[in-house]
């Protein structure tokens, strides 16, 4: 007898094949059978008439590393059909860590670390801590280059010595031996930003040896976008590593349209090498507010940056650098979250509005917020063109990644008005792709969009027995209504779960049943098994 039998639905199996009528049976944590199974015995039957049945979605880019330890039910994740998330992106991971650098690394991750006690040092210890909370989703963990470099070199703006590079390589090997799927870099974030190409190449040779991936937040996504893509491709080709360009975009209006150039560059490289990228379906990004500061102001880490803000002369230089940036529009920057109760009412307001309230210039308002909140402040920044976003997401080499920074408390159990004004991608990324690019505009077929979210993503990550609807595979399954699936989260009201997601199974257990969360936490902490 099967545990669950999903009947009358059309399956989209994740391979790119068109939808087909078939029933899906689940037994234990596996897909037990697919076919004409209507009369088969099962403990629970789900009538999926008019619905699509697909593999659980795989989010290629998140920052849930520590948030999962706080809110392991991950409601915002499972409610959009996601069953597996890649963590440790943009060079930011809470491990490897040394006692000497522990406080600095925690400060670097202050906006996403949520006050959790860091009881780990090795990668294996962190994965064990994650397992102990029994998360609702499967996780795929990368080693963050910021953490790796901080552990060995610190936050100094200089190349690593030969001995330091060898030490980073040893640490990286240890992390991959303990289950890491690869390396991520955040080349706009200190200390990752201080690494020359040669360092990245040598580190990625270690990743390539083991068949992992290199996911990079490139050195630039605006004025020097083309050069940054060239650097990422060069790093991959020289090291032999499989490349994943994170949240590919052309930021700031003078650069809109440049994705036509970068996509051709990536296509050409993909003829010779394993290269892909991911994106989210929004025209705004989200990051630390401190990213508005010039890079030199961030040197040495958060504590050094805050010290500079306390020096009147240096503060004036930082302010002047911001005010002289012609593309920095303070009306396009919203405050998403702050740490203190004092400024909670400012969440959701633009920097321009806050400047008026505080009777300061916009640049000074930014510096004041960073200082007051001790860097624990995030922003939503409108910098992209919708046509560019659509062009990137519909490209055959593009996968889907939300870039969500956090896992909020379940808005069905707490007052959403008490929660930060997070980016709506936190709840809506995958349903938005299906609503906007499939149902409404027809830029993608259902089977192609689902393949991006499932089979292609699993293939990139080399996940074993996941990403497809196939007998014997793990039962990560989503049932959704193609006529209703839609994102409801907005920038003003972000804590709204998507419509149209009916059932979500994670390793055979329903995390969403009849559109409602069950509280089940059946996710697995996945460990890389190599090529």
Image (cartoon, rainbow, N blue to C red):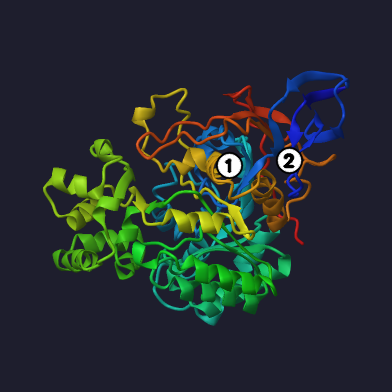
**Residue 3 at what x, y percent from top left?**
80, 24
Quarter of image, res 439:
top right
Q: Which residue is mark 1?
A: 434
Tell me if I can see residue 334 in this picture. Answer: yes
Find numbered disc 1 in the image and state the secondary structure of the residue it sits on. helix
Residue at 60% across, 42% down: 130
Residue at 66% across, 45% down: 450
**Residue 194 at what x, y percent from top left?**
43, 73
**Residue 220 at what x, y percent from top left?**
43, 68
| Residue 102, placed above or below residue 211 | above
| Residue 119, placed above or below residue 503 | below
Count all numbered tags in the image, as a single digit.
Answer: 2
Q: Which residue is mark 2?
A: 12
In which quadrant is the N terminus drawn?
top right
Instruction: State the separation of the CA atoms marked 2 and 1.
Output: 13 Å
Crowding near the residue tagged with mark 2, few <14, some 14–19, many ≥20 C-alpha atoms within 10 Å = many
């Amino acid at each position: 007898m099967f545990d669950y039998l999903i009947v009358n639905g059309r399956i989209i199996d994740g391979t790119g094949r068109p939808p087909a009528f078939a029933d899906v049976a689940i037994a234990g944590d596996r897909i037990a059978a697919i076919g004409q199974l209507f009369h088969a015995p099962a403990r629970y039957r789900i009538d999926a008439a008019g619905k699509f049945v697909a593999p659980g979605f795989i989010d290629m880019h998140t920052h849930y590393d520590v948030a999962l330890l706080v809110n392991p039910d991950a409601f915002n994740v499972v409610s959009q059909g996601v069953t597996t998330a890649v963590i440790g992106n943009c060079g930011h991971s809470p491990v490897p860590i040394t006692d000497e650098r522990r406080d600095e690394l925690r400060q670097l991750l202050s906006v996403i670390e949520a006050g959790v006690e860091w009881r780990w040092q090795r990668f294996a210890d962190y994965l064990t801590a994650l397992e102990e909370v029994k998360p609702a989703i499967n996780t795929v963990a990368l080693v963050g280059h910021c953490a790796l470099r901080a552990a060995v070199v610190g936050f100094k703006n200089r190349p690593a010595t030969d001995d330091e590079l060898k030490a980073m390589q040893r640490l990286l090997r240890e992390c991959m031996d303990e289950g890491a799927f690869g390396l991520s870099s955040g080349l706009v974030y200190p200390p990752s930003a201080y690494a020359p190409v040669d360092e990245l190449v040598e580190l990625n040779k270690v990743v390539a040896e083991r068949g992992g991936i290199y996911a990079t937040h490139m050195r630039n996504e605006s004025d020097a976008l083309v050069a940054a893509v060239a650097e990422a491709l060069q790093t991959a080709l020289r090291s032999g590593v499989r490349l994943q360009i994170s949240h590919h975009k052309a930021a700031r209006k003078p650069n809109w349209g440049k994705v036509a150039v970068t996509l051709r560059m990536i296509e050409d490289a993909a003829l010779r090498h394993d290269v892909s990228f991911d994106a989210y379906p929004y025209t705004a990004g989200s990051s630390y507010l401190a990213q508005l500061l010039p890079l030199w102001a961030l040197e040495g880490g958060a504590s050094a940056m805050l010290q500079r803000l306390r020096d009147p002369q240096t503060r004036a230089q930082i302010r002047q650098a911001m005010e002289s940036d012609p593309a920095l529009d303070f009306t396009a920057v919203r405050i998403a979250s702050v740490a203190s109760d004092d400024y909670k009412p400012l969440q959701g307001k633009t920097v321009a509005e806050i400047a008026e309230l505080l009777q300061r210039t916009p640049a000074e308002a930014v510096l004041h917020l960073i200082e007051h909140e001790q860097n624990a402040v995030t922003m939503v920044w409108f910098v992209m063109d919708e046509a560019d976003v659509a062009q990137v997401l519909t490209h055959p080499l593009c996968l889907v990644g939300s870039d969500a920074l956090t896992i909020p408390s379940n808005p069905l159990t707490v007052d959403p008005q008490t929660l930060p004004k997070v980016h709506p991608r936190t709840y809506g990324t995958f349903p938005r792709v299906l609503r906007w690019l499939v149902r409404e505009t027809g830029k993608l077929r259902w089977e192609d969009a689902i393949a991006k979210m499932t089979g292609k993503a699993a293939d990139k990550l080399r996940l074993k027995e996941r990403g497809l609807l196939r007998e014997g595979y793990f039962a990560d399954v989503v049932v959704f209504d193609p006529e209703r699936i839609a994102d409801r989260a907005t920038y003003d009201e972000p804590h709204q779960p998507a419509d149209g997601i009916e059932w979500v199974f994670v390793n055979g257990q329903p995390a969403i049943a009849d559109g409602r969360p069950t509280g089940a936490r059946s996710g697995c902490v996945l460990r890389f098994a190599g090529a």
